[in-house]
Image (spheres, helix red, strand yellow):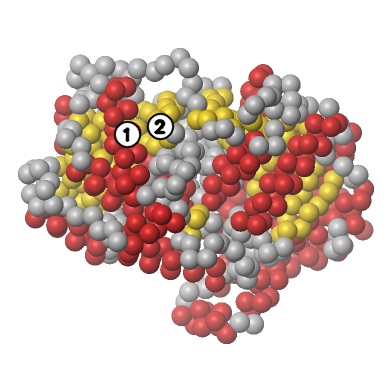
């Protein structure tokens, strides 16, 4: 019989400070081209995390870090890692397969045993990672048990659901995404074709499990497949508990607010502690950590994890051979980890390295691999704490190179780049991409801003005359008060944009314009060029017009400022051709900074 445990709601949604306060950056390790994150502890039972794919991995990176950190505090060593060809790991020459991922999981387990002295492995898997975890555990004679979260054990069904999710995304945007024909994509993540082919024929069973094997199922509410899995595990002889995966939908809704189900993290830790009491107080050795930092290298670039001020995680990517001509710091977009949406910062870094330009893609506090600052704000996006982190990163880069340093970011990362760069004398250039708030309205709630999403006024106009919109209103799918508030906000901005030049600082917009222009004049005096990049589909172009006029004529007052409008682009730069264009703009900005010296 399946034991079911229902979670109560508790704690703050964003920060995870209660669980994260004593935490430090996990120990980075390199394993045959994979990058991993080790959480040392002295217990005999270790935990290997098998992540979901693509967008789901992006949304759950912080969640899994918090689980691993909590388990390590309870005495269970843990390792998280990026599959070959995913995240920070190196690409696979002939393409990754499902068995490539399984082999990567077994390699991570080997690394965990070697570094911590643990004897048994508990495999945690989420989404398609649950299929990886099951298959790896079936091949590991040190298997201790499973944690299976929102499992996807049928590859064909998983691909079908992924395609439906992508269709919902593409239906809301009138652009040509330009993904390779026949590819499996989700939110700008494109699956390796060999892996997609593998998954079409994949079904992972649960036969042959040892009698009494502990297994925890994190079941999505009202998901019959998860409940059926728990029952099948029980029938096979496993000792099964089931926990409601509350917060699953909100967590996978994106990375703008990063809600963390803290009660669920506690419940997972409690189950592991109950099921493996030998996990603490054993005589297993602590992790053996070498002095040399791990390195991932190809014939085109060299990557190395960087820890800034013992608290901020990043990955530097340097060109081979020779020294860099410039360094671009790539900043987080909301709560998206340092790899970037659709791995944009990974691809950017490795492409720029071939042009002699180094990068540091970094997680600021409470994002991705970087723990929360116990003394910092709960909401870090758009906060002064985030700007302090950027300054710390710039100091770190300057301590190791004399090359020009540029800051680049998308959306909130663009805001951090602009504001930190304006006051930091070591910053030689700024590239702001799809910045939805050039200046924060002091009366605007940041949480509301983040949840509002990226959408221009023209899109609201188009939808207002759409038959499908009327149908969604009748069915209750449209949040009318929220939509009305967003339209009113756009309309107010448009009116104020017309009158504020004549009223100056007598209007709030006039004061905000004065703040922006003050930043830009400061950058002009330091001869720091600023590149604004925007697109038509997200509101970033509307923001440029709000401050610089309908024809952007106000930009002429700043000779070091240029504006580039991306066509056929969305907020997260999904089309591959658009990403190539942006990488070219970043390279040009870096090369110009090098020429100025």
The residue furthest top is 291
Element assignment for label 1:
helix
- Residue placed most toward the observer, 319 or 571: 319
Q: Is residue 142 above or below residue 569?
A: above
The residue sitting at 69% across, 50% down in the picture is 582
Residue 175 at x, y percent in the picture:
63, 68
Kindly identify which residue carries mark 1: 107
Q: Is residue 173 visible?
A: yes
The residue sitting at 45% across, 43% down in the picture is 92
Instruction: Tell me: 363 left or right of 34.
Output: right
Residue 128 at x, y percent in the picture:
33, 53
Q: Is residue 173 above or below residue 333?
A: below
Kindly identify which residue carries mark 2: 32
Instruction: Tell me: 512 left or right of 342.
Output: right
Q: Are marks 1 and 2 in contact (CB under 8 Å)?
A: yes
Instruction: Tell me: 428 left or right of 232.
Output: right
Element assignment for label 2:
loop
- Residue placed most toward the observer, 235 or 3: 235
Q: Is residue 257 above or below residue 541?
A: above
**3D distance between C-alphas at marks 1 and 2:** 8 Å
Q: Is residue 572 above or below residue 466?
A: above
Q: Quadrant of the C terminus?
A: top right
Residue 48 at x, y percent in the picture:
30, 36
């Amino acid at each position: 019989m399946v034991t079911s445990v229902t979670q109560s709601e508790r704690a703050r949604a964003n920060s995870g400070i209660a669980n994260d306060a004593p935490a430090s950056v996990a120990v980075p390790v390199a394993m045959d081209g994979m990058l991993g994150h080790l959480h040392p502890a002295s217990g005999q039972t270790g935990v290997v995390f098998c992540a979901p794919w693509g967008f789901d991995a992006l949304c759950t990176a912080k969640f899994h870090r918090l689980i691993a950190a909590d388990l390590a505090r309870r005495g269970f060593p843990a390792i998280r890692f990026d599959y070959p060809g995913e995240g920070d790991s190196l690409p696979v020459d002939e393409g990754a397969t499902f068995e490539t991922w399984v082999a990567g999981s077994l390699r991570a387990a080997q690394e965990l045993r070697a570094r911590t002295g643990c004897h048994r492995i508990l495999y945690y898997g989420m989404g398609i990672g649950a299929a990886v975890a099951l298959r790896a555990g079936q091949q590991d004679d040190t298997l201790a048990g499973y944690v299976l979260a929102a499992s996807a054990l049928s590859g064909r069904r998983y691909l079908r659901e992924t395609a439906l999710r992508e269709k919902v995304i593409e239906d809301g945007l009138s652009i040509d995404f330009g993904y390779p024909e026949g590819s499996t994509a989700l939110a700008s993540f494109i699956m390796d074709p060999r892996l997609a082919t593998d998954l079409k024929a994949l079904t992972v069973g649960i036969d042959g499990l040892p009698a009494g094997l502990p297994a925890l199922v994190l079941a999505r509410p009202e998901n019959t497949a998860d409940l059926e899995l728990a029952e099948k595990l029980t029938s096979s002889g496993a000792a099964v508990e089931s926990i409601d995966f509350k917060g699953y939908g909100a967590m996978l809704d994106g990375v703008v607010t990063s809600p963390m189900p803290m009660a669920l993290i506690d419940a997972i830790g409690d189950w592991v502690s109950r099921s493996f009491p030998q996990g603490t107080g054993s005589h297993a050795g602590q992790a053996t950590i070498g002095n040399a930092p791990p390195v991932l290298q190809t014939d085109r670039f060299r990557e190395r994890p960087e820890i800034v001020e013992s608290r901020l995680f990043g990955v530097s990517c340097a060109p081979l051979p020779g020294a860099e001509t410039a360094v671009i710091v790539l900043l987080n977009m909301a709560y998206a980890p340092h790899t970037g949406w659709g791995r944009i910062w990974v691809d950017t870094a490795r492409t720029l390295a071939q042009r002699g330009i180094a990068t540091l893609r970094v997680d600021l506090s409470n994002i991705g691999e970087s723990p929360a600052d116990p003394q910092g704000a709960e909401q870090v996006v758009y906060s002064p704490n985030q700007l302090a982190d950027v300054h710390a990163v710039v100091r770190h880069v300057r301590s190791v190179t004399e090359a020009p340093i540029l800051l680049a970011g998308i959306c909130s990362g663009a805001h951090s780049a602009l504001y930190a760069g304006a006051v930091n004398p070591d910053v030689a250039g700024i590239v702001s991409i799809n910045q939805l708030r050039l200046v924060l309205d002091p009366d605007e709630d940041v949480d509301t801003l983040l949840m509002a999403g990226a959408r221009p006024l023209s899109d609201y106009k188009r939808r207002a005359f759409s038959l499908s919109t009327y149908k969604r209103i009748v069915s209750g799918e449209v949040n009318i008060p929220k939509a009305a508030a967003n339209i009113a906000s756009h309309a107010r901005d448009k009116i104020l944009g017309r009158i504020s030049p004549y009223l100056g600082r007598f209007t709030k917009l006039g004061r905000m314009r004065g703040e922006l222009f003050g930043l830009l004049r400061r950058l002009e005096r330091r001869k720091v060029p600023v590149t604004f990049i925007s697109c038509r589909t997200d509101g970033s172009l509307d923001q440029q017009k709000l401050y610089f006029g309908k024809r952007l004529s106000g930009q002429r007052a700043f000779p070091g400022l240029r504006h580039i409008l991306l066509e056929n682009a969305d907020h997260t730069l999904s089309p591959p051709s658009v990403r190539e264009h942006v990488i070219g703009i970043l390279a040009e900005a870096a090369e110009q900074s090098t020429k100025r010296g």
